[in-house]
Amino acid sequence: MDGMLAIDVGNTHITSALIDRGDIREIFRVPTVQCLETGTFFGHLPVSRKDIPREIVVSSVRKAVSDIITKECARELQVEPFIIGMEADMGITNRYRTSHTLGIDRLVNACAGYHLYGKGCTPLVIIDMGTATTIDYVTGQGEFLGGAIAPGLLSAYRGLLGLAPELPRVEISPVQTIVGETTDECMRSGVIASHAAMVRSMAAMMAGEKGTNPGVIVTGGLSSIVANLLPGDYIVDEHLTIRGLSLIYDINNPQD
């Protein structure tokens, strides 16, 4: 099959997408633990083997999962996936001082943000809301400097419940009320609205530290939960990482 399969292996979920001529056609999400427990990735995709493209690109923060995918590609598809590492050409400059500890997803986001939204015109703050919430700074010249790693929205919520088990379990969905009038409303405001406030404040603090007016991009599976509480000029692109995988694959595998 023509096209590309892009696979982003995170700590909680594996997000994959079928991409055709740069356009995302379908998105699939598999729990990371499910892949590890069963020893298969393709076995959880609702796609027959004959419909899986032969161009496959992977970024992963879990080596055990990328090993499973690589072996399955060889055994079942007779292809070698393109595994994105620090040495890949991303069209940006990595200025992070401890690259050996840097999650590849942060660089992929930086690449996508720079090429799609900031190239040659503005610095960026890129916020990825997943198991952790990462907030990173990219200069207008495409230099990834680093940023901050905070507990993710759900990670913080679960940690609170673990330490205060009498608090109620609440629905994790967009909130309209900041001043809660019930314990449920207070919990939802504190968990969701405070996370939106954190990322807004961190973006502003980074801008102040650098003396710039960066564009702000918010991505990740939880971005839609806080989108209504963010400034209107923020760009919310839930699939920024997947777009970055496609871009990096094309940079490193130019077509004749």
Image (spheres, helix red, strand yellow):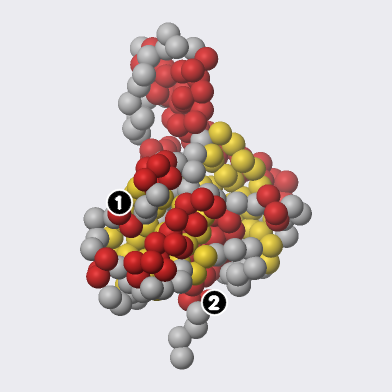
Question: Within 10 Å of the Cα at label 1, are there few (<14), some (14-19), or many (20+) other Cα atoms?
Answer: some
Q: On the rendered image, what quadrant is the N terminus found in?
A: bottom left
Residue extending furthest toward the front = 75
Dot 1 falls on a residue whose secondary structure is helix
Look at mark 2 in the image and give the residue it sits on: 252
Look at mark 1 in the image and give the residue it sits on: 44
- Would you say 68 lies left or right of 24 here? right
Seen at 38% across and 38% down, the residue is: 225
Task: Compare marks 1 and 2 and give the one earlier in the sequence.
Answer: 1
Picture quadrant where residue 21 is located = bottom left
Residue extending furthest toward the bottom = 256
Picture quadrant where residue 24 is located = bottom left
Q: Disc 2 marks which amino acid?
A: Asn
- Would you say 231 lies left or right of 29 here? right
Frontmost residue, 178 versus 13: 13
Question: Within 10 Å of the Cα at label 2, are there few (<14), some (14-19), or many (20+) other Cα atoms?
Answer: some
- Would you say 253 lies left or right of 168 here? right
Q: Disc 1 marks which amino acid?
A: His
State how far apart marks 1 and 2 are (Cα).
Answer: 28 Å
Seen at 24% across and 55% down, the residue is: 46
Frontmost residue, 158 versus 62: 62
Frontmost residue, 244 versus 45: 45
- Residue 101 percent location from the top left of the image: 68, 50
Q: Is residue 117 above or below residue 10?
A: below
Dot 2 falls on a residue whose secondary structure is helix
Q: Which mark is residue 206?
A: none
- Residue 240 percent location from the top left of the image: 45, 57
